[in-house]
Amino acid sequence: MMHTNIPETDWKKVKSEIQKTWSGLSGNDLEKTYGDVRAISGLVQKKYGLKRDEAERKLDEVIERCGTAAGKASPSSSRTEEKRAGAHGGHPKKSERR
């Protein structure tokens, strides 16, 4: 899977495209994923009976079609995950520097 999180700025557009592709996914279901691509992939797998790799591949294609920042795998998406996990942004603390 190429993408990890869909930026909030792109969420409406990507969510709309996901719903065009998989009309059985409700907006409420998608909102509960908070833009987490793995969670969305899990919904697609469950609802449509796809294997994990197939659901991930198709979801990546949908995201790419949107032409937004979400359609580009970038370091910013991993920074978002670090912030959510409580990481300190990749810079060592003074006590960690050598």
Image (cartoon, grey):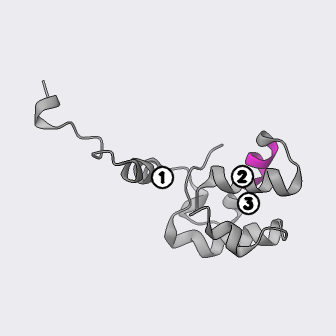
**Mark 3 or mark 1: whose residue is earlier in sequence:** 3
Q: Quadrant of residue 63?
A: bottom right
Task: Name the quadrant of the N terminus.
Answer: top right
Assess whether mark 1 and mark 3 are in contact (beta carbons under 8 angstroms).
no
Residue 14 in view: no
Q: Dot 2 lies on which element? A: helix
Disc 1 residue type (three-letter): Ser
State the residue position of label 3: 62
Instruction: Look at the image and give the residue range highlighted in magenta.
Output: 54-59
Q: Nearer the observer, disc 1 or disc 2?
A: 2
Q: CA distance from mark 3 to mark 1?
A: 17 Å
User: Which quarter of the image is occupied by the C terminus?
Assistant: top left
Measured in 3D between alpha carbons, the distance from the residue under mark 2 to the one under mark 3, in whole angstroms, is 11 Å
Residue at position x 45%, y 47% from top? 78
Is residue 58 positioned above or below 21 on the image? above
**Residue ID at (72%, 52%):** 41
Q: Residue at x 73, y 60 (%)?
A: 62
Residue 56: within the magenta? Answer: yes
Find the residue positioned furthest to the right: 49
Q: Which mark is residue 49?
A: none
What amino acid type should be assigned to the residue bearing mark 3? Val
The local crowd at label 2, few if under 14, some if 14 to 19, many if 20 or more residues have their Cα within 10 Å, is many
Q: Are marks 1 and 2 in contact (CB under 8 Å)?
A: no
Looking at the rendered structure, the number of numbered marks drawn on it comes to: 3
Q: Looking at the image, is mark 2 or mark 3 earlier in the sequence? A: 2
What label sits on residue 41 in the rendered view? 2
Q: Quadrant of residue 19?
A: bottom right
SS at mark 1 in the image: helix
Q: Nearer the viewer, residue 3 or 66?
A: 3
Residue 33 vertical position relative to residue 13 in the rendered view, above or below: above
Q: CA distance from mark 1 to mark 2?
A: 17 Å
